Image (cartoon, rainbow, N blue to C red):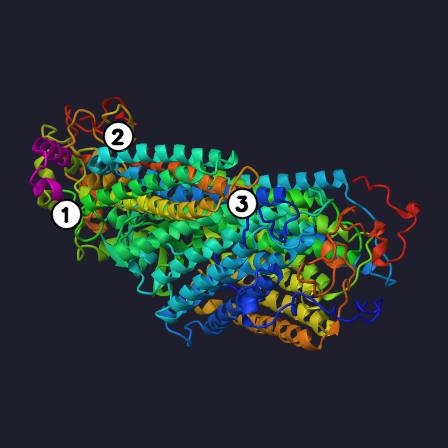
Amino acid sequence: MHRTGELYGHFQTMEQQKDSATLGMWIFLSTEILFFGGLFLTYTVNRHYYFPAFGVGGNMLDLTLGTANTVVLIASSFTMAMSVWSAQTSRKKLLPLFLGLTLILGCVFLGIKYVEYNQKFDHHLVPGHSFDITYRVSHPAPGDDLKELAAEKKELDEGFAVDPDLNSHSQLYFSLYFGMTGLHALHMIVGAGLLIWLIQQSFKGRFAAEYNTPVELVGLYWHFVDIVWIYLFALLYLINRHPG
Amino acid sequence: MQSQLPLYPEQASNFASSVDSLMVFLSLVSLFFTVAITSAIIYFFFKYRRKQVNEVGVPIHGNMRLEVTWIVIPFILAMTMFGWGAVVYVEYRHPPQDTLDIYIVAKQWMWKAQQPTGFREINELHVPVGRDVKLILASEDVIHDFFVPAFRVKMDVVPGRYNTMWFRPTKVGRYHFFCAQYCGTNHARMGGWVTVMEPSDYAAWLSGSSGAEADPIVLGEKLFVEKACSTCHLGSGLGRAPSLNGLYGAKVLLAGGSTVTADDAYIRESILQPSAKIVAGYQPLMPAFQGQLTEEQILALTAYIKSLQSQPVPAKGAGVAPATEKK
Amino acid sequence: MSPTSTAPVHAMPREHYLNASYGIRSWLLTTDHKRIALLYLASVTFFFFVGGIFATMIRIHLLTPNGYLVSPENYNKLFTMHGVAMIFFFLIPSIPAVLGNFLVPMMIGAKDVAFPRINLLSWYIYITGGCFVLYSFSTGGLDTGWTFYTPLSSVYSNSAVTPAVIGIFINGFSSILTGLNFVVTIHTMRAPGMTWFRLPLFIWAQYATSIIFILGTPVIAITLLLVGLERMFHLGFFNPALGGDPILFQHLFWFYSHPAVYIMILPAMGVVSEIIPTFARKPIFGYSFIAGSSIAIAVIGFLVWAHHMFLTGQSTYSALAFSLLSYLVAIPSAIKVFNWASTLYKGSISYDTPMLYALGFIGLFLIGGLTGLFLACLGLDIHIHDTYFVIAHFHYIMVGGAVMGYVGGLHFWWPKITGKLYPEFLARMAAVVLFVGFNLTFFPQFILGYLGMPRRYHNYPPEFQVLNVMSTAGASILALGYLLPMIYLTWSMRYGKVAGPNPWPATGLEWRTDSPPPADNFHVTPEVDWEPYDYNNRPDLGLAAPLAPSHAPAHGDD
């Protein structure tokens, strides 16, 4: 049955139904903030304890890929906002287009993330028994920028001078890196699933000015996931990054 | 001995009477409110019991004056309890000067105590009566808690840091101590006895029992050489690292311009993570010993550094901040 | 005083939510909040039994100083599993998920909660989490204490910690979604005329509880997830040997787990606030103070967590601040007790079972709350922290308070839920047995604690034996007190007298429909034009006309 704007039996009016859904989404997002909050607090406390190790860890991330991902996500936020606008103004042709663009950008983000994770595996930076912060400088791969590796080695040596346990402390950094970005990526995957559902429904023309709550709510969720990424990018990649 | 059903443990330290007085005060306040409210309820219960099946009560919706009363009075009482409790707690958390320092190391599931002379006991602790005793607590594995009911004191023993507690025994005798923080299988068996002795007995006990055990100062001196501390920390103050003579208890001037008192926690941190606080005028050259020394080895090193207190402090290059040297 | 003495003989309604559809699918796929409440009722009762069996074994073991029943390892598992089953799978979901699910939509005049399918999902999440925890219990058990303190839980314990923390992590989402559902329902689904200050106080309590669900649960979920990851992959978030901080875990843990105590007690306070005006047949004294104090407790409750950590070596200033805030949270609780007691003044009080539970609640909560002041007192906490004093205190709050409120609430709404009356005399007996058994079990533990018996001890010095024997004796009476209601309530479902729509009679909207209610709750959407608990302006209840105005007291100046 075509369910556009259907009123569920336990609601009295469409307006009430929409208010409920919107409020529910906002409350859900506030629990999400606290959910990530626990991780942010753990990050902050450990960063305070192990400043040198966290600096070294941060410098080992690939700033280019991180920045690219940030740009991709901000762009996807824009296309998501355009999707909501298309739905609200009943532009039924534009809506699937913008939703599709958002989905593609989301997938690009996950793809880049995959490349980044893969790199960390190659560099033995995944927490566990094989974790070795010095692996990359001691095992240069062909095509690595030797000057950069030399600078990295110097930094590692300086790090070990002040913190001989740099390896296990930077492992803590990478545990948090994988924990936080992994949880974020999980949210992206859920968001992509929601987008696929929205696209399918939008082809049926379900969303228009009079009924577009699902688009709005997925939009809220998508923007929230973007904002979390902005914080992660700042905390994990940018903060205390050495010049050069 | 006390009666079959005592209401409080023996009072054997300076904190016992202040904690018990708090207990009596709070119990009286609680008793008053419990009796007052329950008797009001029971009185109303019988006085206003339903007499006819169709009867309804008198519509009283509230009374602002009463509400204010029962907000303000409990508030005042609560603040009194808070203030009084805070006074006792602050005293407990700030040990007096000139204490008898005993190191306690906890591990699953035993307590080791180390007297200032280096004599070590397991699941026993001997202290002299009337003397301020400070326990410096360290754990090798999980969180434990040193608890002496007769002294009304306890403190968590947290791995990776020192906690301190203090008390002044007031009564000769033998008292239970327990581990009060759940620590695994034999948590309930992790206890022992505190023996409070007359100071003369204590001195005799110490002199009679030491000697067989390794002196921590000697052990610490050995470690000091073994771990190559002695190559930089020269007594003359001319080495690459500050002299440790006269360090313990003094104020140390740090690179940032701030000062810190060289207590056990500072020395521990400086051994394990030297970069955390750099002495003014020195380079951060020292390797960290995190994970390379047991708690007991750290205690031995600390004991050795303490023993250098009487050594002459070199004029130049001491880690001791000149301005605040005489405290 | 039997509730049926005034009522004519009733017949069961022809159609109601219980016979609206049949078959196992109609239950497992239901989105009816009333049926979901019954699903929760069955599952929390199961976990109550599981936890209760552990408790029984603990008390039998502690009869003698050296304990003959179980080994130290097994004793540690018993108290851990008792705590985990009771706290995460019985107490936290008990009133919110059972009574709350049944009553929140009915009390505000809605047909269902805002998100019925999410409501069913919550139950499935709860069951999934429960299965993980039962798996942990049955394969190696759990011996970390319900507090999961690191590094004991993350490194040293040899028991099945990982499935247990995953189970609790999953269960957290059940709480979050239930809280979300209730907040939205209360905001958007109220019937015409049901203004905020006409809401029953149970709704205010549920609202406050839901806030804690929403803001606290995610934190414990992520914290326990980190413990699980730390165990599985040898990470070091909270392990000092790898550079982590065990005290950080305690901060994160108590940030949720202290407010969790208010999750347990606030709904029970809500139940008592419904029962007392009903059986005193007068408006509750200080409605807005009771409603506001629920919110105050929920808010201040978030600012007191570090009072569990006065002796971890935290800074003196932090201890002072948390002690002060802990005293502040006592004030709204005191307000409630005074207002309940004053409600009885010039009432028309009956001795029906729910009233006995409510009054028992006040007495036990009073002791539990007042002993909380002892523990918040910094100087005193040095001595009684982590002793049996703490055990006694929180059992007075959680069992004496929350469980009395839950069982009392079950009795109060049982006629609504099942349409049947339970045997009144037996029920009153059970209430008295529970009250006596409870006090005998837990009061001696206050003294034990002050004498210095630490908690979580499988053996103890012989001088503590007398009090332990008293406690175990009380526990056997208490067990009887729990078994009785289970038996006669189950019996009454089939053989009880038909209750009729409003047996007490009570003023809430839930009583203005059939018992048991139809699937849609109300035949006509109700409209509210009366104040809460206003017996004097409710001719529909069939009670006597109110007393003449001249009898009204002078100080009725709302």
Residue that label 2 marks? A240
Residue B110: assigned label: none
Residue A137 forms part of the magenta stretch:
yes
- Which chain does tag 1 point to? B
| Disc 3: CA contacts within 10 A as few (<14), some (14-19) or many (>=20) | many
Residue that label 3 marks? A24
Residue that label 1 marks? B218
Looking at this view, is C384 or C261 the one in front?
C261
Which amino acid type is marked by label 3?
Gly
Mark nearer the viewer, 1 or 2? 2
| Disc 2: CA contacts within 10 A as few (<14), some (14-19) or many (>=20) | some
Image position of A135 with respect to A150: above or below: below
Mark nearer the viewer, 2 or 3? 3
Please, what secondary structure does the residue beneath circle 1 have?
helix
Q: Is residue B132 visible?
A: no
Q: Quadrant of the C terminus of chain B?
A: top left
- Which chain does tag 3 point to? A
Residue C7, x across and y down, in percent: 83, 67
| Residue A222 shown left or right of residue A153 in the figure | right
Q: Are marks 3 and 1 on the same chain?
A: no
The stretch of residues the image draws in magenta is A135-158
